[in-house]
Amino acid sequence: ARFCISEAEILLALYNGIKECLVAEEKAKPTPEDIVKSIEELKPKWPDNITLQCFDRKYYDSLSDENKAKLLECMNSGIQNPDSSMGCYACRPDDYETLKPFFKAALQKYHKVDLSKTKHVTNWDITKLEGVPEDQKLDVAKLGVKENLSMRVRTGRNLKKFPLPGAMTKEDRVQMEKDLQKVFDKLIADEKFGGKYVSITPGHPSFIDKKEYDSLVKDHIMFKDMSADKYLLDAGIARDWPFGRGCYISADRGFVIWVGEEDHLRIMAMAKGTLLNVVFDRLKAAIDYIESLIDGGCAKSEEFGVVTSCPTNIGTGMRASVHIKLPNLTKGGSDKNAKKILKPLGLSVRGLGGEHTPIGVDGTVDISPSARFCISEAEILLALYNGIKECLVAEEKAKPTPEDIVKSIEELKPKWPDNITLQCFDRKYYDSLSDENKAKLLECMNSGIQNPDSSMGCYACRPDDYETLKPFFKAALQKYHKVDLSKTKHVTNWDITKLEGVPEDQKLDVAKLGVKENLSMRVRTGRNLKKFPLPGAMTKEDRVQMEKDLQKVFDKLIADEKFGGKYVSITPGHPSFIDKKEYDSLVKDHIMFKDMSADKYLLDAGIARDWPFGRGCYISADRGFVIWVGEEDHLRIMAMAKGTLLNVVFDRLKAAIDYIESLIDGGCAKSEEFGVVTSCPTNIGTGMRASVHIKLPNLTKGGSDKNAKKILKPLGLSVRGLGGEHTPIGVDGTVDISPSARFCISE
């Protein structure tokens, strides 16, 4: 009601309505018998739901009313979500004992063990296991792993003195977090750990805001918001979010403790490397220390080992995993084939953010031994080591042969007429090549094969590829740049005075054209060093060495008053290394290039491999001259300014390039026929892009650059958003425009 009722009566009606709601809600609450009937109806329909399948009516009827209620509480998530695999969660540390017949049946069914013949045994000592290398070092570099892996080992612990998360009240959660502060204070004071504790409990002294929380989640340090997880909500685990939730983070970010997730504590050690013992030994030492500090100790069962909320984790509570690249087993961007091959080997395959999350665009997956129970901690670590060995064997077997790749090209070619790489593949030419050059050609074509929606799709991998594989690249260049190379060739010329249509004073000042405000002007070009492979074929060592070799060039620039400034690197361990915060700030300011490791096109081209090694940026004192190192070309050199006189950035770039090229040992790669050599054939010739940011509110009416592109493309102009291709235009109609041509046109 709104009319013929007073404001005061509306408020009272709301109060009384809430009272009636609560009465009606209580009446609608199912009785224990209603729940049992629901279980019996669901059981035959959901054969894979372990909770439902392990419910025994006779056992249930034998329980006291108190224990009947406890059992139904533990089963609730599986009843409410019959598509669950396990579906039950212990709610008190002693539930595995109190409700042993039910949990024993569930444990046997899930873990595929016979508990009448075996029991869980704890053992962290790998020296007593068969199959461990003589030096007891589980170093995956010995297995052929060529780069550092992201390694993580975690386990769960629950405090004896509190209910498990499924039965905790809000007050329990807050009190437990408060009680644990003394443990974290000890860790923070210990030089082996240090760091800090952060909380998302409102009012907590170490409370962090949403921005910091989201940043920690993104970095895989903090756990995700559980309040949207229906399975955990129905288990009672995600209730009262975000109270009693937080995270201890060591100073080196290599040791983390989650508080208030699925278990009271999720304790994990992380590192980048190849020696699995590093994270395992750190976790073991930390657990021993932490357990000694916890008042009342942690919940353990003589028969079942470490007590966890979910029976899937009981025993060790441990998951040991690595992120490893398996591009052949994950072809097509799916982990389906990897799971099919690795599951029989006892390995779980996940995405990089956990279950039901995407794999890496480069084929990186998270693998771990599946077993947690009736296997020791040491055996899990050895299983991971042996699992990695099996992965590498399976990955090699899944590698396509050259003939497989050619067949794939021939199948794709008629389906993707706009893919220049596929359209320029000539089987007769391919067959005429040596095996070495066949392999080179397929390497150059790989991105276009793996990503058939590409426009160009091929990338040169060595400075001489345009010569060695000239028939292929010549066809691609002609098709993309719409030139006939039998009638024309690329000519380099930086002198505007010799061109028709240049103003008498030779000043290309757009103010004369009616531009009333300063424009953001940028001219950039690419250069590649002769002495290194192009980025697509570089090893990690090549990238690091090239950055090191270039330091003398940057030192000269820094010492020159016309340039000054600094060099910054994102290569771990580099003397000029910058942290993520500074890197993100430079990206936001359009000074530094974006993280390439998520770009599938560049990953498949080999260009984005080994990120962030060998990547950096020289920045002049006035921020008007920048050199990117290790992006799509070895060097992306650019001059920027605000103004109306285009000559300013053009002349500065030309003078700088002449100086820089004179300093580079061995010089830069150039072709007599094709000009400046670049990785991508779209940039070859000048390697140059000259652009301005200009307001075109009428051509971008409605916030889209669609009309601007339609009108300006026939004029030879490209239109982009302010952050590059596929990014938004400015809200005021500002767009980035540049001449499209790079090749068979002079600077």
Image (cartoon, grey):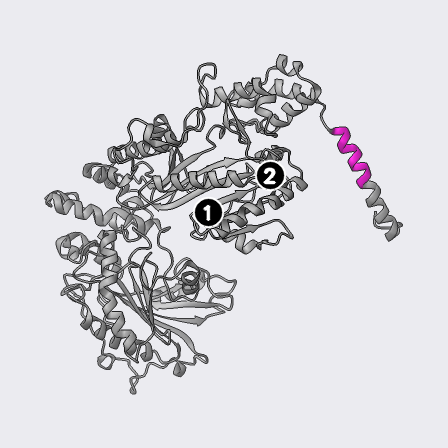
Q: What element carries label 1?
A: loop
Q: Nearer the viewer, residue 192 or 367?
A: 192
Does the stretch in magenta take in 139? no
Q: Which of 4 and 373 is in front in this view?
A: 373
Q: Residue 528 carries which label?
A: none
Q: Residue at label 2?
A: 238
Residue 423 shows up from this direction: no
Does the stretch in magenta take in 23? yes
Q: Is residue 509 above or below residue 316?
A: below
Q: What element carries label 2?
A: loop
Left/right of residue 275 with respect to residue 312 in the rendered view:
left
Q: Residue at label 1?
A: 220
- Quadrant showing the C terminus: bottom left
Residue numbers of the magenta segment: 18-28
| Disc 1 from disc 2: Cα separation | 19 Å
Q: Is residue 556 above or below residue 118?
A: below
Badge 1 or badge 2: first in the primary sequence: 1
Residue 732, how many percent across, how many down? 51, 69
